[in-house]
Image (spheres, coloured by chain):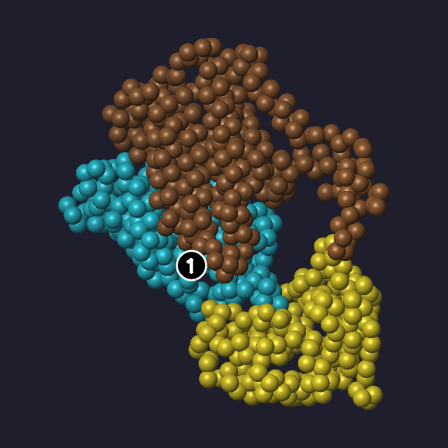
C-alpha cells in the first residue's frame, strides 16, 4: 500500500492516495472558507458602510455583471468588443424609459433590457463573427460611436443630451439604498452562477476550443460562427442587464455616460482583472470604478486614457491580469510550483 | 442643389478616402487595423493649425504637416508597435492600437484643450462645393503617386513582400523593421492629408477624427480591406451617401449621419464581406 | 579560414533546450547533409545559423561570426535559408518573388536578369509561370521557387530544410540532381536536412547524424 501522499504510480492498478491511503493530515478547505467569508461580508456590507460607500459598492457589483458578459467574448472567445458600453447604455436607457416615461414597475425592466440587448447583440455579432476578429472590433466600435447621437436624437423619449432622472426602487423594508444593494447582489450572484454554468457547458467548452484553434474546432463539427454569435448575444445581455441595474442604482442616465470611453474602460476591466476568470470580473469592476474616479482628479479627459494605457501595459506584461498575479502569489505562499 | 450636395459629398469623401487608404496601407503591411489612425491624423491637423496660427501660409504649412506626420508614424512604429508586432494574437495588436488611440487623444487634449477651433480653409470665399472638389483634386494625384510607388518600385516590392511574409522577407535580407517604419510613416502622412482636408468642414477638436474613423472603416470595408483603390472608391461612395442621406432622408438629419457608415458596414459584411474590390478571402483559416 | 565552422552550438526555444553543443564544418564547395530522427534538432540547427533562433557558442562563415546577428543581417552576409514551410510570397508573382531575392546581394541591381536566367536553367518549369501569383503554384513548384529565390541572392551558404518533403519520387530525384548541379556550377556551400537518406548520401560530401541535440556520427564521402 502506498504511504506517500500524492504519489500515484503509473500502471493499470490505481493505488489510493490522500485520506484513503491513511493520510490524516488536515487540509484546510480554502475555497469554501473563502466563499463563506465573502458571502458573509457581502450580506453585512450595507449595515456597515455609510451610504456613499454603499453606493460605490453597489456600482462595483453592477460593473462586475457587465464584465462577466464581456469576458465571454474577450477572455473566453479571444475577441475584442468595443461596443459593450453601448449595450450597457441600451440596458440603462431601457430601464430608464420604462420607469420614468411609462411608469412601469422596476422588476419588469430587467427581463426587457435583457431580451432587447440579447437581440441587439445577436444582430451586431452575426455579420462580423463569421469573419476575422477585427471586423467585430470595427462593428462594435461603430455601434459605440453611434449610440450617444442616437440617444440625443429623440429627446422626447430619452430626455436628450441633458439626460433624464429616474426614480430608484423604493424599499419595502430597510433603507432604499440597502434594498437596491441587495437586489443588485441577488442579480450578481445569479449572474456569476449563470456564467459558471455557461462555461462548463458544451457551449463554453466549444468557445475555448474555437479560441485555441478555430480550424480544428470546425473539423470537429463545431460551427464557430454560431457559437461565437451566441456567446456574443449572451454577453450583450449581461451588459444590458447591468445597465438596467445601473439605472436602479444611480437614478440618472445621460447619453455621454455611455460613449466609447465606457467601452474602453470595460475592456480594461476585463483585461486587468484577468480574462477567462470569475474573480477577474470582480477585480476588474474595482478597476472600472476606480480608474475614472482617480483619473478625473487629474483631467476630465483622463479616464479613457488611463484605461487605454493600462490595457496595453497589462496585455503586454501580465496577460493573466490581476487574477493571475494573485494566484501566483497565493501559490508561492502555499508552497506550490506555478 | 443636388449638384451642390454631390460636390460636398465628394469633398468629404476625399477625406474619408485618405484615412481609409492609410488604414488599408497599414493593414497590408502589418495585418493590423490601426484604430489610432484617426487620432494620429488629428494630431497632425493640430500641428497644421498651430503653424497657420503662428503665421505660416496655408500652402507652406501643409507639406510641413505631412512631413511631421510621417516622422510621427515612424516613431510610433519604432517605439510602440515594434514591441508587439512579433507576438501573435489579434487581441494584443488591436488592444495596443486602442491604447495608442486614447494616448494620442489625451496628448492633444492636454496640449490644445478640448476647445472647438475653426480650421482655415484654403479657399475661404468660394462656395462649399468648389473647395471640396479642389481638395479632391489635390488628394487624387497624391494617392495616385502612392499607388505607383507601391506597384512599380523596388521599395514597393519589398513592402509587399514584408506584408506577405515578414519572416521570409527577413531571410531574404530585407530590413523588415525599416520597411514597417516606413509604411507606418507613409500611412500616417496620408492620414494627415485626411485630417487637413476635413478640418475646415468639421470643427477642430480632439474627438474630431473619431467619427471620421467610423466613416473610413466603412469605406475600407466597402472597398475591400486589402485594396487601395477600393479604399478610395469606398471613401467617395461613403461621403456621397452620407451627405445625401443627411439632406434627403428626414429621420437621419444632420445628427444621425454617423449611423450611415454603421449600416453600410453591416450590409457589406452580410452581403459581400470582401468588399467591392477586395480579393483575399476574409474567412479565418 | 574558409567555409562554415561551428563549435559548441547551443540553442533552444525559451525553456526548451534543443541543441546541446554541436560541432560541424562545411568547407569550400561542399554539400553537407544532416540526418537524424524527428526532434533531433536539425531544423533548429539551421535556424540558429540563419538567426531565426538565438544561439550560443561559435559559428563563423569565412571567418565572419554569425551568431548574435539579426536574420536579415545574416542574409546579407551571404546565408540563404529555405525553410520547411517554403517561404514564398503568395500575392507576389513568380518574377517578383525572384527579384526579392536580389535584395540581399551586395550589388543589388547588377545582373538581376542574368540571375533570373540562371534560375530558369535549373528550374525550367518556373519560366512558364512568370506572371502568376506564387500562391497559385503547386507545392513542388513553390518549393523550387523558394530555392530559386535563394539562388538569386548568390549566397555563400545555402541552408535547405527538407527540400524534397512532400514531393513525388520523380520530382525528388530531379531536385537532387539540380542541387548537385548548383553545387558544381556555383560553388555554394550547402547544408541540407533530409530524411531521404539514400538520395541525400548520393550528393553529399559529408553526412552528420544528429540525435537529441548532439552530433552522434559523421561520415565522409570516401567511406561509403
Instruction: Answer with left or right where residue B56 lies relative to residue C77.
Output: left
Question: Neighbour class for label 1 at 10 Å: few (<14), some, many (≥20)?
Answer: some
Single out the residue that lies furthest toward the left: B1
**Between A134 and C49, which is closer to the camera in this rendering?**
A134
Q: Colour of chain C?
A: yellow
Quadrant of the frame with the N terminus of chain B:
top left
**Between C197 and A260, which is closer to the camera in this rendering?**
C197
Q: Is residue C62 visible?
A: no
Q: Colour of chain B?
A: cyan
Which residue is labeled 1 in the image? B282
Is A138 situated above or below A190? below
Q: Residue at x 62, y 68 (%)?
A: B171
Instruction: Give the percent coordinates (x, y) of residue A3.
Output: 84, 42
Local SS, label 1: loop
Is C210 situated above or below B42? below
Instruction: Give the percent coordinates (x, y) of residue A167.
Output: 36, 16
Q: Residue at x 52, y 69 (%)?
A: C89
Chain coloured brown in this rendering = A
Instruction: Give the percent coordinates (x, y) of residue A131.
Output: 42, 54
Q: Residue at x 74, y 29 (%)?
A: A28
**Between B130 and A59, which is closer to the camera in this rendering?**
A59
Q: Chain of mark 1?
A: B
Is A291 situated above or below B149? above
Instruction: Give the percent coordinates (x, y) of residue C40.
Output: 74, 68
Q: Residue at x 37, y 61 (%)?
A: B278
Write down the quadrant of residue C199 in the picture. bottom right
Instruction: Answer with left or right where residue B75 lies relative to residue C213.
Output: left
Instruction: Please tell me how many numbered marks the rendered image carries.
Output: 1
Instruction: Answer with left or right where residue A259 lies relative to residue C207.
Output: left
Amino acid at each position: 500500500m502506498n504511504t506517500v501522499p500524492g504519489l500515484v504510480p503509473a500502471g493499470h492498478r490505481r493505488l489510493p492516495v490522500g485520506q484513503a491511503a491513511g493520510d490524516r493530515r488536515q487540509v484546510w478547505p480554502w475555497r469554501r472558507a473563502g466563499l463563506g467569508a465573502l458571502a458573509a461580508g457581502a450580506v453585512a456590507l450595507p449595515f456597515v458602510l455609510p451610504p456613499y460607500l454603499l453606493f460605490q459598492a453597489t456600482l462595483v457589483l453592477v460593473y462586475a455583471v457587465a464584465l462577466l458578459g464581456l469576458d465571454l467574448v474577450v477572455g473566453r472567445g479571444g475577441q475584442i468588443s468595443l461596443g459593450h458600453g453601448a449595450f450597457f447604455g441600451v440596458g440603462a436607457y431601457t430601464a430608464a424609459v420604462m420607469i420614468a416615461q411609462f411608469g412601469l414597475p422596476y422588476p419588469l425592466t430587467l427581463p426587457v433590457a435583457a431580451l432587447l440587448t440579447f437581440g441587439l447583440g445577436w444582430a451586431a455579432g452575426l455579420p462580423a463573427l463569421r469573419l476575422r476578429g477585427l471586423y467585430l472590433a470595427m462593428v462594435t466600435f461603430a455601434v459605440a460611436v453611434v449610440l450617444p447621437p442616437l440617444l440625443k436624437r429623440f429627446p422626447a423619449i430619452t430626455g436628450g443630451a441633458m439626460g433624464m432622472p429616474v426614480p430608484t426602487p423604493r424599499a419595502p423594508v430597510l433603507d432604499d439604498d440597502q434594498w437596491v444593494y441587495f437586489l443588485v447582489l441577488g442579480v450578481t450572484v445569479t449572474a456569476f452562477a449563470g456564467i459558471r454554468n455557461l462555461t462548463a457547458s458544451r457551449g463554453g467548452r466549444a468557445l475555448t476550443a474555437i479560441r485555441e484553434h478555430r480550424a480544428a474546432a470546425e473539423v470537429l463539427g463545431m460551427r464557430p460562427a454560431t457559437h461565437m454569435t451566441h456567446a456574443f448575444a449572451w454577453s450583450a445581455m449581461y451588459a444590458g442587464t447591468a445597465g438596467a441595474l445601473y439605472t436602479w442604482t444611480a437614478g440618472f442616465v445621460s447619453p455621454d455616460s455611455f460613449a466609447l470611453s465606457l467601452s474602453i474602460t470595460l475592456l480594461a476591466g476585463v483585461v486587468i482583472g484577468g480574462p477567462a476568470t470569475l474573480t477577474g470580473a470582480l477585480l476588474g469592476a474595482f478597476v472600472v470604478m476606480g480608474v475614472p474616479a482617480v483619473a478625473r482628479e487629474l483631467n476630465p479627459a483622463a479616464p479613457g486614457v488611463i484605461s487605454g494605457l493600462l490595457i496595453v501595459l497589462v496585455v503586454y506584461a501580465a496577460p493573466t491580469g490581476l487574477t493571475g498575479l494573485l494566484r501566483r502569489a497565493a501559490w508561492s505562499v502555499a508552497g506550490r510550483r506555478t | 442643389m443636388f449638384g451642390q450636395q454631390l460636390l460636398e459629398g465628394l469633398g468629404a469623401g476625399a477625406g474619408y478616402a485618405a484615412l481609409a487608404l492609410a488604414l488599408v496601407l497599414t493593414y497590408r503591411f502589418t495585418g493590423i487595423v490601426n484604430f489610432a489612425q484617426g487620432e494620429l491624423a488629428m494630431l497632425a491637423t493640430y500641428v497644421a493649425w498651430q503653424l497657420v496660427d503662428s503665421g505660416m501660409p496655408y500652402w507652406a504649412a501643409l507639406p510641413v504637416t505631412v512631413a511631421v506626420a510621417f516622422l510621427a508614424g515612424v516613431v510610433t512604429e519604432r517605439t510602440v508597435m515594434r514591441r508587439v508586432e512579433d507576438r501573435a494574437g489579434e487581441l494584443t495588436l488591436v488592444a495596443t492600437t486602442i491604447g495608442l488611440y486614447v494616448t494620442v487623444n489625451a496628448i492633444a487634449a492636454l496640449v490644445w484643450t478640448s476647445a472647438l477651433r475653426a480650421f482655415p480653409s484654403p479657399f475661404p470665399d468660394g462656395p462649399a462645393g468648389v473647395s471640396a472638389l479642389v481638395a479632391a483634386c489635390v488628394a487624387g494625384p497624391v494617392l495616385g503617386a502612392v499607388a505607383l510607388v507601391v506597384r512599380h518600385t523596388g521599395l514597393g516590392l519589398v513592402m509587399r513582400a514584408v506584408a506577405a511574409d515578414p519572416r521570409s522577407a527577413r531571410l531574404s535580407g530585407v530590413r523588415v523593421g525599416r520597411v514597417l517604419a516606413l509604411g507606418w510613416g507613409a500611412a500616417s502622412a496620408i492620414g494627415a492629408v485626411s485630417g487637413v482636408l476635413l478640418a475646415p468642414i468639421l470643427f477642430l477638436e480632439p474627438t474630431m477624427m473619431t467619427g471620421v474613423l467610423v466613416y473610413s472603416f466603412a469605406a475600407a470595408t466597402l472597398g475591400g480591406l486589402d485594396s487601395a483603390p477600393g479604399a478610395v472608391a469606398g471613401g467617395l461612395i461613403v461621403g456621397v451617401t452620407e451627405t445625401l442621406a443627411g439632406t434627403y432622408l428626414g429621420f437621419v438629419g444632420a445628427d444621425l449621419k454617423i449611423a450611415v457608415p454603421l449600416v453600410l458596414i453591416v450590409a457589406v459584411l452580410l452581403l459581400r464581406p470582401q468588399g467591392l474590390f477586395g480579393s483575399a478571402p476574409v474567412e479565418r483559416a | 579560414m574558409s567555409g562554415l565552422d561551428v563549435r559548441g552550438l547551443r540553442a533552444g526555444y525559451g525553456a526548451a533546450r534543443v541543441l546541446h553543443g554541436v560541432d560541424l564544418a562545411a568547407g569550400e564547395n561542399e554539400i553537407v547533409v544532416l540526418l537524424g530522427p524527428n526532434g533531433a534538432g536539425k531544423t533548429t540547427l539551421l535556424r540558429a545559423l540563419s538567426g531565426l533562433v538565438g544561439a550560443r557558442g561559435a559559428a563563423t562563415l569565412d571567418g565572419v561570426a554569425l551568431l548574435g546577428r539579426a536574420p536579415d543581417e545574416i542574409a546579407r552576409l551571404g546565408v540563404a535559408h529555405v525553410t520547411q514551410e517554403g517561404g514564398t510570397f503568395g500575392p507576389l508573382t513568380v518574377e517578383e518573388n525572384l527579384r526579392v531575392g536580389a535584395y540581399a546581394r551586395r550589388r543589388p541591381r547588377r545582373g538581376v536578369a542574368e540571375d533570373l536566367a540562371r534560375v530558369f536553367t535549373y528550374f525550367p518549369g518556373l519560366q512558364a509561370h512568370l506572371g502568376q501569383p506564387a500562391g497559385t503554384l503547386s507545392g513542388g513548384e513553390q518549393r523550387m521557387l523558394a530555392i530559386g529565390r535563394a539562388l538569386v541572392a548568390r549566397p555563400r551558404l545555402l541552408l535547405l530544410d527538407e527540400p524534397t518533403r512532400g514531393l513525388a519520387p520523380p520530382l525528388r530525384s530531379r531536385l537532387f540532381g539540380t542541387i548537385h548541379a548548383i553545387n558544381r556550377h556555383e560553388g555554394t556551400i550547402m547544408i541540407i536536412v533530409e530524411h531521404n537518406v539514400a538520395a541525400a548520401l548520393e550528393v553529399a560530401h559529408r553526412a552528420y547524424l544528429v540525435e537529441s541535440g548532439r552530433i552522434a556520427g559523421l561520415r565522409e564521402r570516401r567511406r561509403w
